[in-house]
Amino acid sequence: MNPRQLDLLKAVVNLPTAPYHEQYVDQFISQWMLSLGAGKLLTSRRDRAGNIYLQYEHRPRSKRKLVFEAHSDHPGFVSLSRSRKGRLRAVFRGGVRSKCFAHARVRFWLPESLSTAASRRTLPYISGRWIPAEIASVKPGRQATDQIVELANVAAALPPGSIGMWDIPDARITGSMLYARACDDLAGVAAVLAALEELVNRKARASLTVLITRAEEVGFAGSLAALMNHELEPSTSVIGLETSSLRPESPQGAGPVVRVGDKTSIFSDRLTRFIGATAADLTHWNNDFCWQRRLMDGGTCDTTAFQAFGYDAAGICLSLGNYHNMCESTTRISEALRAGPEIAAETININDFSNLVALLVAIAESFHKYNPDSAALKTRLSKMYRQDQRPLLFAHTSNKIS
Ligand SMILES: [Zn+2]
């Protein structure tokens, strides 16, 4: 696997983040763009809700708009008060069962100085340190996705608004597995950045927007803001990149998953078919490439929101282990990768990741061939019937009606 892609993946999944508090991912992307030196090939803007739009443009062959979307948050804590005598009150946002909080450890991010800008081609570094804390109690918050948490043994003074995550070490790779505090959806963010790097390095002919949305874990807040404020042209095709809870039929290591739907909807038939055809093409000339086509109905993702607002929308995901850090106490995983009896690192397969990047690059480069016309499949089937099948079908029958 490409070492630069692996470094990028590890750097992004190590970033502190929580729903509505994605500033370090934002900072990282700003500095990454500066260090990339892509010139006019890559430009960026932010909308009023803080979603990021990275526009790659080089001699495009079609006018149809393509968006790759990934979200920059992960279920996490935000401190509500200043820590006093080792105690702190925080809100946890995101879907984690409350029983998993029992006897778990948390770490809060304390920034140390303004982060240093990356030099050319080196990855940005966000400067700060993690402050450990322990969970003392949990009760339901005002929103369905909120829990109010009291923390004890907080090892330093922390201001309100500090980001907390489970006390899991920085990303590590064992065999082909990556273990990290937050694969969902920072691995999706890393994949789209890696795909952009590849397009920039090759000066590929393509036009696409990478959209990094905020606060998905509380119910697609960033995507809904983009949709309600008409940030995307109606004819845009949107491909959502996610990590999604693995299923027995979507094992890790069997390739990125072309996701035909989620818990709530079935995605664009035409766009999903185009992605599948692009993936099938890749298998012809790349022996290491594999992919799967599955329904991942463990949760509902941003693609459902884009689809509900009338966009041509599809999804690709990585099969995710220990979804939202929930991990049964009986699951075999190193103690060092646990933050409690039922909390542990999330996992993805790094070959799935590199195949996802390859697929994204191939989609971007061949998107001019995409025919969103719903009659295209009917036309192809009709032609096959008339040219190849009908003469044979009627050659040996007395039935002359065709
Ligand atoms: Zn997600």
Image: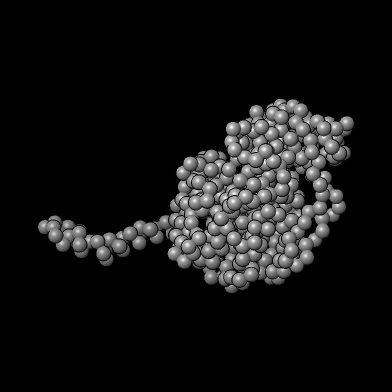
Residue positioned 62% across, 57% down in the render: 192
Q: Is residue 353 above or below residue 388?
A: above
- In the rendered image, residue 352, in percent from the top left (x then y), is placed at 55, 54
Residue positioned 47% across, 47% down in the render: 294
- In the rendered image, residue 253, in percent from the top left (x then y), is placed at 52, 51
Q: Report whether 41 appears left or right of 133.
A: left
Task: Identify the residue at the far left of this view.
Answer: 398
Residue positioned 77% across, 42% down in the render: 163
Q: The N terminus appears in which quarter of the rendering? A: bottom right
Residue positioned 53% across, 39% down in the render: 298
Q: Is residue 55 above or below residue 333?
A: below
Q: The C terminus appears in which quarter of the rendering? A: bottom left
Q: Is residue 150 visible?
A: yes
- In the rendered image, residue 134, in percent from the top left (x then y), is placed at 77, 33
- In the rendered image, residue 392, in percent from the top left (x then y), is placed at 20, 62
Q: Report whether 109 appears left or right of 268.
A: right
**Residue 67 sits in quarter:** bottom right
Q: Report whether 290 appears left or right of 200.
A: left
